[in-house]
Amino acid sequence: MNLEKSTQVFAEAKEVIPGGVNSPVRSFRSVGGVPPFIDGGKAAKIYDIDGNEYIDYVLSYGPLLLGHAHPVVTEAIQKAAEKGTSYGAPTAAEVELAKLVLKFMPSMDMVRMVNSGTEATMSALRLARAYTGRDCIVKFIGCYHGHHDSLLVKAGSGAVTLGVPDSPGVPAAVAGTTITVPFNDEAALEKVFVERGSEIAGVILEPTPGNMGLVPPKEGFLEFIQSLTKKYGALFICDEVMSGFRAAQGGSQSLFDIDPDITCLGKVIGAGLPVAAYGGKKEIMQMVSPAGPMYQAGTLSGNPLAMAAGIAALNYILDNDVCARVESMTAILTGGLQKIADKYGVPVQIHRLGSMFTVFFSDKPVTDFDSACACDLEAFKIYFHTMLENGVYLPPSQFETNFVSLAHGPEEIEKTLAAAEKAFKAVAEKK
Ligand code: HOZ
């Protein structure tokens, strides 16, 4: 595969951007090699500046449920852009997207738009602290909720990929208000509440974590968290930035018997533009400024281009049963991957939920951060690079989730499985 131009631009990039990228996992540092620099995308494919094409399973880490440059989305953005790109004043489109989001997520009565998942979770924590008058937050080891100080503690995603799950620069006093617990460990969580329940403002989690790879909750685990938070007067905060419209149309919370106090959304609700949101019960959301005293603001929040993209995408998703359609294609793909891995005797744990999946290179169940970290990262590297060389672009980390879009049809799945034949064979031969 020729990556001459990407190699040259990457070298230039490293002179002007730290590590050459604007988000660390893109650098390929953990898998090695040069990241292809992308020139464009259409439907299920992306194209790099060297003229290589790839079937894309990154999809901007989830937002592109309809695939790249879906006409419904691009036309909505173009139309909005002709009327101006930002006003710093309210628009009817913000109300329309808010209503649409609330329709999908019955646990939420009100919602506030922000620009990134990081902002959404950061604001959700401030809200939980303001509402309860308490300082401590419980998070799960290996869950990732963006890069703000309170939550960059034992974090997954790029932080673990690059080996900095506890980043320098986070003040000890802030990190000290974050209590971490292994995911799926009811006893550890209960112990924390028994010892420090009166200090805990909320528990934040990805209900179906996707940032240590995709790890499902054990039966009853989410319900247990909900009952514990209720008992101790803490808030139950679900980060569905990744799983919203991906695990299912109503997010992971629609698959379990839970009713979070606050939910964070992002990715799909902006269809690839920088949008995220936090919302929840009216009584809690009324604390947010200017309705209440908890301050949070943003010049570009509710940006008209982003609102237009989100409205167009969510209406299309609703009208065309998109989540269910993409889920069934994803199931065909993961079933095929499992068969090929078995054929070559490569031990894997393939987890799928809706249109998200992870292939863990392990012969043991993956249920939490420790078991995810015990995967064979060398095998992952071989798999990753062989897929890339054969035109399949996967997240460059064992600790990220793969995403499928509506544009991934039988032809793309067949080509992906053909590449996987080579990839699993290569892994088996290196063993
Ligand atoms: N938070 C995204 C999903 N794990 C990754 C995006 C990034 O770190 O660039």
Image: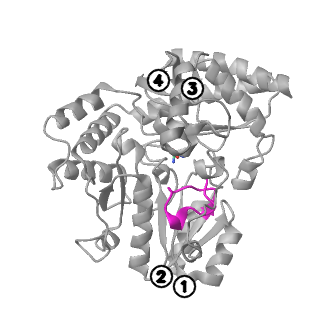
Q: Nearer the viewer, mark 1 or mark 4?
A: 4
Which SS class for mark 2? loop
- Give the main secondary structure of the magenta stretch: loop
Earlier residue among tags 1 and 3: 3
Which SS class for mark 3? helix
Q: Amino acid at mark 3?
A: Thr
Q: What residue would you read off at disc 3? A: 7
Give the position of the C terminus as an image quadrant: top right
Query: What residue lies at 77% left-to-right and 36% top-to-bottom?
Result: 378
Which SS class for mark 4? strand
Q: What residue would you read off at disc 4? A: 46
Q: Nearer the viewer, mark 3 or mark 2?
A: 3
Q: Are marks 1 and 4 in contact (CB under 8 Å)?
A: no
Residue 346 in percent (x, y) is at: 80, 29
**What is the spatial separation of the Cα atoms under label 4 and label 3, in whole angstroms?**
18 Å
**What is the spatial separation of the Cα atoms under label 1 and label 2, in whole angstroms?**
8 Å
Q: Nearer the viewer, mark 1 or mark 3?
A: 3
Give the position of the N terminus as an image quadrant: top right
Q: What residue would you read off at disc 1? A: 198
Against 300, is 337 above or below? above
**What is the spatial separation of the Cα atoms under label 3 and label 2, in whole angstroms?**
50 Å
Q: What residue would you read off at disc 2? A: 134
Which SS class for mark 1? helix
- Whether residue 402 is visible here, answered yes or no, is yes
Q: Nearer the viewer, residue 172 or 411?
A: 172
Magenta residues (range): 140-157
Q: Nearer the viewer, residue 347 or 4?
A: 4
**What is the spatial separation of the Cα atoms under label 1 and label 3, in whole angstroms?**
54 Å
Q: Amino acid at mark 1?
A: Ser
Q: Are marks 1 and 2 in contact (CB under 8 Å)?
A: yes
